[in-house]
Image: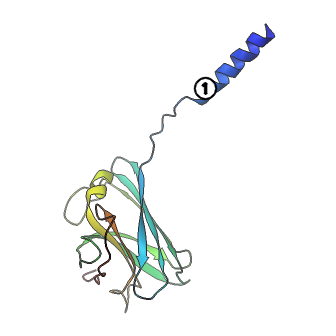
Amino acid sequence: MKVRYIFLLLAVSIFSGCQSSSEPELRNREFLLHRANYNPVKGRITVTELGPGKMEFRINLENTAEGGLHPAHLHFGDVSEVGELALRLNDVDGATGESVTVVDDATLADGRALTYDLFLQLDGSVKIHMNDNYFKHMVLAFGNVGKNEDYLFDGVAVCTGH
């Protein structure tokens, strides 16, 4: 009888550990951010779907300097194109090299509703700028995103109009 009871407890604990949770699995994709020119700043951006129409853009850069704020933008087109601004992201904090932007029911500059699936098909790029003053057009780090994930490097365009 004791053996049957122990076996029953063991079976219940195994099967209860296999139950699936009711929370959906979050989809995410990571893209490299390359250094521009001779500066040492590089890193990655991770884009995570938090729910329908809700996304998180998390930028992590290495070798940024304390005291600096670096504007970050999602652009239409790959990094070699000037590319219209699609969406402003929160500035990267030079002290930590991090930026987190959460958008909920966001609209891109061309009027399309931003969803995770649209983002994955987007002809886009991310550019991090030196600052928002004198060097605002200088790109500090960059990377292609969406359908442009893999590319051969052929230069990075400056950013204007923001």
**What residue did someone put label 1 on?**
16
Spot occupied by residue 105 in the image (x, y as percentages of width and height): 31, 54
- Is residue 69 visible from the viewing direction of this image? yes
**In the rendered image, which quarter is residue 133 located in?**
bottom left
- 18 or 93: nearer the viewer: 18
x 54%, y 84%: residue: 65
Spot occupied by residue 139 in the image (x, y as percentages of width and height): 37, 83
x 61%, y 30%: residue: 17
**In the rendered image, which quarter is residue 152 located in?**
bottom left
Label 1 crowding class (10 Å Cα cut-off): few <14, some 14-19, many 20+? few
Spot occupied by residue 117 in the image (x, y as percentages of width and height): 30, 51
x 44%, y 40%: residue: 24
- Residue extending farthest to the right is 2
x 19%, y 64%: residue: 110
Left or right for 76, reference 26: left
Spot occupied by residue 98 in the image (x, y as percentages of width and height): 51, 71
Left or right for 119, reference 97: left
**Residue at disc 1, secondary structure:** helix
- 115 or 106: nearer the viewer: 115
Q: What's under tag 1, amino acid-wise?
A: Ser
Left or right for 77, reference 127: left
